[in-house]
Image (cartoon, rainbow, N blue to C red):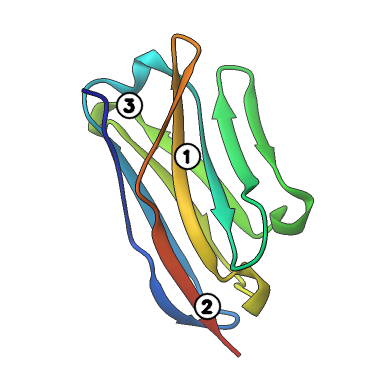
């Protein structure tokens, strides 16, 4: 059974940093792409950052502030979030696509205080 487990959320001050982690069951070599999405209250889920064999893509709102990376040896994908803004507050979800099927984690909440 495929499992993606996020961690690292919490409360952070505006301007601060936090790193989210997404640990996958089994090898993440079979996941392509992998990414982070977020959903704020009353809003649709949106793509934040995606990493795939061809490179990385970011939402315009996070470019220059967020960095997605993966550690294949640890079967983990990270999202380093810097210069956080109140509008970054949301539930962040990890997504991994395996053989054409998307899998989602349960989400981790990020709060940003102004």
Instruction: Give the quadrant of residue 94.
Output: top left
Q: Position of residue 39 (x, y in %)?
A: 58, 57
Residue located at (33% from left, 62% from top): 8
Q: Residues within 10 Å of mark 1 (few under 14, many from 20)?
A: some
Q: Which badge, 3 or 2, is on the more N-terminal residue?
A: 2
Q: Position of residue 56 (x, y in %)?
A: 63, 32
The percent coordinates of residue 72 (x first, y second) are 32, 26
The residue under label 3 is 72
Label 2 element class: loop
Above or below, comparing residue 96 to residue 110 in the picture: above
Residue receiving disc 2: 16
Q: Quick one: 105 or 7, which is closer to the camera?
A: 105
**Viewed as shown, does residue 111 lie left or right of 21?**
right
Depth check: 11 or 40 in front?
40
| Circle 3 SS class | helix
Q: Are marks 3 and 1 in contact (CB under 8 Å)?
A: no
Q: Which residue is mark 1?
A: 69
Residue 37 higher or lower than 32, as above or below: below
Q: Residue furthest right?
A: 60
């Amino acid at each position: 059974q495929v499992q993606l487990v996020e961690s690292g959320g919490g409360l952070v001050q505006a301007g601060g940093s936090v790193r989210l982690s997404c640990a996958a069951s089994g090898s993440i070599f079979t996941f392509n792409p992998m990414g982070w999405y977020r959903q704020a209250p009353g809003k649709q889920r949106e793509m934040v950052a995606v990493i795939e064999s061809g490179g990385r893509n970011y939402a315009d709102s996070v470019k220059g502030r967020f960095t997605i990376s993966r550690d294949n040896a640890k079967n983990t994908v990270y999202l380093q979030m810097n210069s956080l803004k109140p509008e970054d507050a949301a539930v962040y979800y990890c997504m991994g696509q395996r053989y054409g099927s998307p899998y989602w984690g349960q989400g981790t909440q990020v709060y940003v205080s102004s």
